[in-house]
Each structure stands twice: as structure tokens, then as C-alpha cells.
Amino acid sequence: MNSVLQRLFGMGDWRETAVSQEAVNRRNLRLLVQLRWLAVAGQIATVLIVHFVMGIRVPIGWLLVAPAGLVVVNLISIPLTQRRDAISDQELMLALLADVAALTWQLFLTGGSTNPFVALYILQVVLGAVLLAPAYAWSLIVVTSLCFAGLGLFNRPLDLPAEHGGGLSLYLAGGLICFLLIAVLLVLFITRITENLRARDAYLADIRQQATERDHIVRMGLLASGAAHELGTPLASLSVILSDWRRMPLLKANADLTQDMEVMQAEVERCKSIVTGILMSAGEARGQAPTQTTLVRFLREVADGWGARDSRVKVELTPWNGLDPRIIADPALRQVLSVLFDNSVEAGARRVIVTPTVSEGCLQVTLRDNGPGFPATVLERLGKPYNTTKDRPGAGLGLFLLVNVIRSLGGVVEASNPAAGGGEVRLTVPIDVLAPEDNSAGELP
């Protein structure tokens, strides 16, 4: 990541990140496939029971054509839900029309509109109203209405035995079974659809929250970049003036003043280094290209650099015994680690242990300190802006920036308070994101 702003805020088109209607249709088609398997089993069982148990002669061969056709539809639909990320409304409409056609065929062979199972058309209409856009739902109503009317004119009457009393008892029993079938299927279906809608709403809410947070970071990044540009010129002027002073014989003769100028020069150089780091993170490197290094060497440089800068905390790197992959020495990742060291110092820790591991294509860096640990409120809202117990203005942005930087790299941040005491933060990032294109394991330094 050579530019934090570039990666962190390159969200792309909202249509690429939000859950599209076509993606929802894919899940709904998968649900229809599951319900259709139940329908196929129920149709076959009903035909066999009516013919062999109840003694009502029906054309078994022709009736079984419908469930056989639905099996074919399912076998076509399953690969679509597996290979494609989106299903159109038209394809979902065709799937429902296949169910309507199968039902119409079976009703045509079993009494037409006098069959109590004709009420199953209502189930198809409800499914269409829930799953389809209004235009397609109204079209489905027209289709089912025409099928119902057609069955009243064209059908094959059932040959009911005389012992069934003219079929009234059968009609009542069939109506009860149809009602129970519709009720059970609707409960199953609506429950699953509700779960899908809740998952979609939760995802959209999370996307909106991330967009808000990233917009917040963009504003801070632009402010920091602008401030870095403004500070560059006065820092360069101070550096030149200090260099001139250090060469003046009158000033060089004063040992105390010479020592003070050396300290001032070191601090100016440090400020210039900070400004350079800010500009590099914003994609405006000041003539410095990212360098390739190895994981352990990079972590060791960060730890040693921090130790030289602040002696209040001791940073220790756990010995590394595995292969040492090559990575890009990213300034942003260096700043992320510095944020954690800063937090440890402010919390009162005096020792931080850094433990890197690489497994399953991911780099995990665990930082554990001997401080008091994280407050419960901070752990609950990890990654939210201004999530801190400090009273000073602007506090609480460190972990917020850290979480979003790691998230932009496709990684995650976890924080906890181990039972042994202190605080622990785990950074997990795909190693390919940090590695150069031609990556190979380096030698242990």
C-alpha cells in the first residue's frame, strides 16, 4: 500500500459494494429450488396415495410428467445459483411460471377448477408478490387467473368411485390438506425471506457506516496532507538557518549553544521525516520510493526505531524461526504499529512484545503490553471514531485510523485483555497485499 488514501478511500461504485436486487434474486432462486424439492416429493406422494390407497383412478404416467419437469427445472437452476452472482427478475419469473405450468397440468388431469388444490395458485401469487418487481407480480396474477379460467372450460373430470358419496367428503378433505400445505409453505418461505432481508439490511447499514467513517478519514487525510505541505517550507528554512549557525565561529565557540543547535537540528530532521511520512501515506512521496525488505527486518526496524525515539517503553520482537517473506516497507503499516506503541505508552505500559506469524497466506502480528488493558467501552466500540476514555480533544482517532487502514488491506483487527494481564491487539493481513509481485522467502536476518 503505497498510498493510504488511495486504498483506504477507493470505494468504487456504490453499485459494486451494495447488495443488488440481482444478488437478492440469486438467494431467492436458491430458496425456490429448496421449496420445489418439497413440492416434487409432495406431488409424487399425493399421486401415489390417491391412486393406490384411496382407489381413485388417475393417469399416473401423465401426472408424474409435472414433477419430472420440475426436477429438470431444479437441475438447471442449481448450476445458475452456483456459477453466477446475480439472477435477473426475468429468470426468477420463468422459474415461477414453471411451477404454475406444472400445477396447471396436474389440475387439468384431475378435475380442473373443481379440484380443491386449485387454491395453490394463491401460493404462486404470494411468492411472486414477495420475490418479483410489481410489474412481474401483476403479470403473474394475469397468468394464474387465465389458467384458473381455462381449467373451468377445459379439464379431465375425475372418475370418483360411488363409495365416496359424490366426492363431497373428498373435496373437504382436499381443501383441508391444501390449506395446511399453503400455510406451512408460506411460513417456511416468508421466514427465510425475512432472514434474507434482515441480512441485506444489516449489510447495507454496515456499508453506509463504513462509507461515513471513510469520508471522515478522507477529510482528516486531506487536512494532514495540506498541513504537511504547509510545514515543508518553514522546516526547510529552519534547517538551512541552523546549518548556517553551526558553521559560524562565534556560535561554534559556545559548547552549550552548539549542543542545543544539534538537538534542534535533530528535531527539525525528525519533523521533516514525519512530514515525508504523511505525504507518502497520502500518495505524494517526496522523491522516496517504497523499498522492498523482509517481514522480520521490517518489524525489527520499526521496533528499533521506536526504542530510539522513546525510551519509556521497551519493544521486543519474538524470535522468528520460519521463512521470512519479502514485503513492501509501507509507511502506513509503520504508522499503524507506531499508533499501537503510542497507545501502550499512554496507557502506562513499559513493555511491548511483538509476535509475527504467517499461516494460510495471512500475516498476523500480535502486540501485547504489560499495561492495564483496554477499558470495556473501548473493546465494545473498537474502530469507532473518538472511542476513548481520554478527555483531551481529538483523542480516540488512533485506533479508528488503525482499524480502517487494516480493513482497507483486506485484514481485521482484534483486541482483548488476556487473563494474564495487559492488553493485546492482533493485526491480520493477507500477505499478498504487502508482498511485491515477485515474492519469495528471504533469508533470516
Image (cartoon, rainbow, N blue to C red):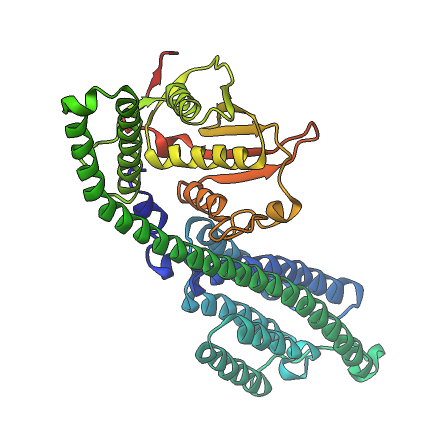
Q: Is residue 47 left or right of residue 85?
A: right
Residue 183 image point, x, y percent: 71, 72
Q: Nearer the viewer, residue 405 or 32?
A: 405
Establish if 438 lies above or below 96.
Answer: above
Residue 325 image point, x, y percent: 38, 21
Establish if 247 lies above or below 94.
Answer: above
Q: In the rendered view of the protein, which quadrant contains the N terminus?
A: top left
Tell me the residue at 48%/47% (across/down): 400
Q: Would you say residue 86 is visible in this rendering? A: no
Establish if 150 lies above or below 411.
Answer: below
Please give the count of numbered marks on the rendered protein.
0
Tell me the residue at 51%/26% (across/down): 312
Establish if 166 lies above or below 93.
Answer: below
Q: Would you say residue 174 is visible in this rendering? A: yes
Q: Is residue 264 left or right of residue 179?
A: left
Q: Quadrant of residue 196?
A: bottom right
Q: Is residue 392 left or right of residue 282?
A: right
Tell me the residue at 54%/37% (across/down): 346
Q: In the rendered view of the protein, which quadrant contains the C terminus?
A: top left
Residue 177 image point, x, y percent: 76, 72
Q: Nearer the viewer, residue 439 or 114?
A: 439
Tell me the residue at 63%/65% (across/down): 189
Q: Nearer the viewer, residue 323 or 418?
A: 418
Residue 165 image point, x, y percent: 84, 82
Q: Quadrant of residue 32?
A: bottom right
